[in-house]
Image: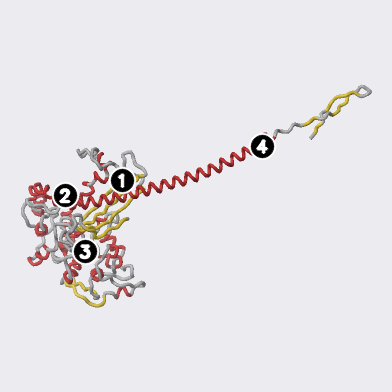
Amino acid sequence: MISLPLTASSDSHGFRRASRRPRVRRLAPPHERRRGIALIIAITALAILAVLLADLHQNTSTSFAIAATQRDQLKAEYMAKSGLNLTRLLVAAEPQIRQVVTPYYMALAGRPPPMLPVWRMADSLLKPFCDPGATRAMSTGINFSSAQGLDDTGATCSIISFAENAKINVNAPLNFTGDRARRSIAMQLYAMMGGYQLESRYDPLFQQRDRDGQVTTRLDIVAAIIDWWDFDLERTVFDPGRGQVTSSGSEDDHYQRLPDPYRIKNAPLDSLEELRLVRGIGDDFWSTFVEPRPDDPDARIVTIYGSGAINPNEAPAEVLLARLCSYLEQQPLCVDPTEAAKFVQLLTTARSLIPLPFFSRVGDFLNFIEGRGGPRDLYPMLQGFLGAENPLLFRPVTVPPAIRVELENTFVTAARILTIDVTGRSGCRERDSSGECIGGWRGETRLKTVVNFHERWTPPPPNAGAMPGLGVFHYYRVE
């Protein structure tokens, strides 16, 4: 575009007038006109690169987190396996440990010690292997820093181990068969549910309708549990007054009337969860007798792994009372709730004060419930501390000679089937100032196992022969 600038000129009369002179506007060079496009291209490229970088960072972070989780999960699994195998090794070495303890135990009790419950101390004894970092911080007087193989891997394991013969067995017993097995289980179950007491705290449990809309009594549950694992097709009938077990009718009638009918197994139970299929085993029964505390497997009252004999050194006082009352149902200890409460409280308190196994032989336990024995036996010792007429002492029972022989076969002071529950953890997300993990773990594995150490039990083919020193697995589950 051409513009004409104004200029001054004179006409004939001498006046000045304005005139226009052509002027050319200068255009920007081509390279200057392209500067805006280059900036837009640069910004667009940076935006694309930023998106790619963010996506690459997210993918890399996700892959790293997955790899770290898989690494920690693998470390936790093998930490749990290490804790399991070390516990089995500790139990296998119990006879050698007992030889070392024998002189000290005899000086206190005047008799050789029974089988020592080393499995209950596994979590403490194996702490240098399960948590080396925490062990070094403890004032044990032992220098673990120079030990090979005890490096801090960032992984830990915790061990819960207990004897299954410290519970009441509801499964087919290993050592009993036929009517003897049915009678033994029936008497234990009925006593466990408070059937022999005049007024039991468990009475409301059997006076309300169950999940199937029926009222299931104690005798119904006793019959249902036995019918589940025995091999006949007739319903079990238990007479608690006479202590007799008979058969009458079909055992499948109840299950066939259900909306989704099924048949009784007629074989031993394989897991505790299988009890859920038995008539009358609902949530109330489960939370009362099977799993009072789901996070603590040792809180169980019943078991499906066992020979039928109970260890008085390991069993809770409630379990011992139920087993005794299955034979001594007419004794005040079994009929009077006050006497039962005294027995439970006295034995529980004595164990908390003296964490040692009291009974070297079954006869020592029978002397305790009868109030007999020497000055180093438990009941006379408690009488010396509390006074012979102290109302806290339970009234001793009277055991007839015929029943005493049977009771001696009912209890055992050793443990041969153990539950070993090990949890391995790795990759703590956050720790406090003291080093304790407060943010959870990236990897966690739990091994729930039941191990048989009984030297008289022969493994089935193709593993037939002598029992391995580390035992054989009855049950193995990874969570």
Helix, strand or loop status at disc 1: strand
Q: Earlier in the sequence, mark 2 or mark 4?
A: 4
Q: How far separated are the C-alphas under marks 3 and 1?
A: 36 Å
Q: Earlier in the sequence, mark 2 or mark 1?
A: 1
**Can you give x and y, in whole percent of width and height, for residue 73 in the image?**
34, 50
Helix, strand or loop status at disc 4: loop
Q: Nearer the viewer, mark 2 or mark 1?
A: 1
Q: Is residue 322 visible?
A: no
Mark 2–mark 1 CB contact (< 8 Å): no
**Can you give x and y, in whole percent of width and height, for residue 274 in the image?**
29, 65
In the image, 388 versus 401, the foreground residue is: 401
**Residue type for callout 3:** Pro
**Residue type for callout 2:** Pro
Helix, strand or loop status at disc 2: loop
Find disc 1 in the rendering and name its residue: 155
Find disc 2 in the rendering and name its residue: 355
- Name the outermost residue toward the left: 374
